[in-house]
Amino acid sequence: MNSLRGKKVHFIGIGGSGMSGLARIALSDGISVTGSDAKDSSVLAALRVLGAEVFSTHEASHVRDADVVIYSTAISASNPELSHAVERSIPILTRAQALALLMQGSKSIAVAGTHGKTTTSSMMTVALQACGADPSFAIGGTLTASGSNAHRGTGSIFVAEADESDGSFVEYKPLAAIVTNIEHDHVDFFQTPEAVTEIFDRFAHTISPEGFLIYCADDEGAKRLGESVISCRPVSYGETEGSDLHIDQIVLNPMSSSARAMWKGRTIGTLELQVPGHHNLLNAAACLAMGLSLDLPANQLLTGLHNFHGAGRRFELKATEHGIRIIDDYGHHPTEITVTLVAAKRYAGDGKVIVIFQPHRFSRTQAFLNEFATSLDLADDVTLLEIYAASEKPIPGISSALIAERMTKGHYIPNFALAAERVIELAKPGDVILTLGAGDVNSLAPIIAEGLQRRFA
């Protein structure tokens, strides 16, 4: 990327979590940045403050003076800016290719897995910062401690969230990687579980031979990958006996958790987190295993993990009104929903867990109708919004109503205002309201908070 200093790089889809992070790093590297998105947002406003020229429409004229164009794979081939770049033979990079360039020359750590990537990447970053490393990072969500999703650090380490959704993470070629779990998802791209397994196999073979793969021994998919890899050193973590980083003596509290941590049979301390859930102990164990494999001090890694306060949209407390807590979470796969609701019920105590869920993508909804119904029924009450399409075209006959029909506690109310009104009237002091999904359901959190204020005024 050094060759791009003083040149103009245009980002198509710059408002996305991944693309905006790359733009931030490019700006800090002295690269002239322009970009476009389908609508204006706080993300675009923040990039303008940093010096980017950003547009809230897609027009061919935006790329007229660009030296390089970077685009998100969510962008259609018919996008006028992408089409214009192709016609004018402007060099074009995918987001993954651009991120791979940004990581060149660093000790790169790629954090992959079907679930937990953003939280684990964020934990890894905070743990490294506690060791004085000042890593660069590009994460698919906002790191609560810094309020940013990307940063060009002064240290030699670069932490990157490796998104498997379109298979492009095989571009990264990291020094080391974490794989939290492997499960069938992104069914618009991977039609079978075997296709997901195959892309993770390919990803593992891109890790440097001098590096290592940190994998979860508690997850069947990750375990199979870790036990089969021969191109780099495998390092296991989890509750499974014999794991290189083994955790036990687990304590789960409403908003915290802890476990004893042992590294290759020797106790190194207590892993204490200020975030809830068994899954987060595993995420932290992955980071601890990575840090120790990098020869970083255990006590500083443990301190950093203890000081981790979460990532945006990951069981994030948005407001408390008259004893009713409003939590927002990005969970959008049945497995993620299950672990989130287990944590939410522990957090709610004697109160009820009231959910507004927005499914993400028609293809995922169609593939996991029964699984969504089973996981969501862990809550005390669920209001289902209509499916958030993302970049997909609707699939005839597929609707959130099909999930509700399979549930005992599901209520299909596609109208946002009516859904918010319903939970505002339903909630009582001590309850937890959870806005859940990867779309724009999080926009309801402040509306619900205001509604509760009016109700109890």
Image (tube, grey):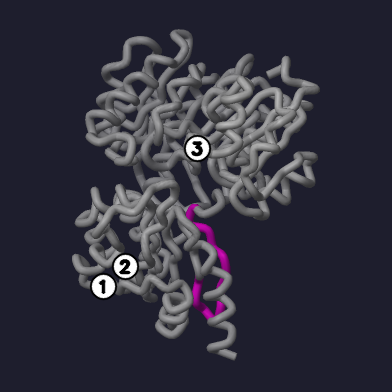
Q: Residues within 10 Å of mark 3 (few under 14, many from 20)?
A: few
Q: Residue at x 34, y 54 (%)?
A: 394
Q: Residues within 10 Å of mark 2 (few under 14, many from 20)?
A: many
23 with respect to 18 (left or right): right
On the image, numbered disc 3 is attached to which residue? 78
Who comes first in sequence, dot 1 or dot 2? 2
Q: Quadrant of the N terminus?
A: top right
On the image, numbered disc 1 is attached to which residue? 409
Asked which secondary structure carries label 3, the reply is loop
Q: Amino acid at mark 3?
A: Ser
| In the foreground, 223 or 335 | 335
Q: Is residue 316 magenta?
A: yes
On the image, numbered disc 2 is attached to which residue? 379
Asked which secondary structure carries label 1, the reply is loop
Gap between marks 3 and 2 measured at Cα: 42 Å
| In the foreground, 374 or 124 | 374
- Quadrant in which residue 126 is drawn: top right
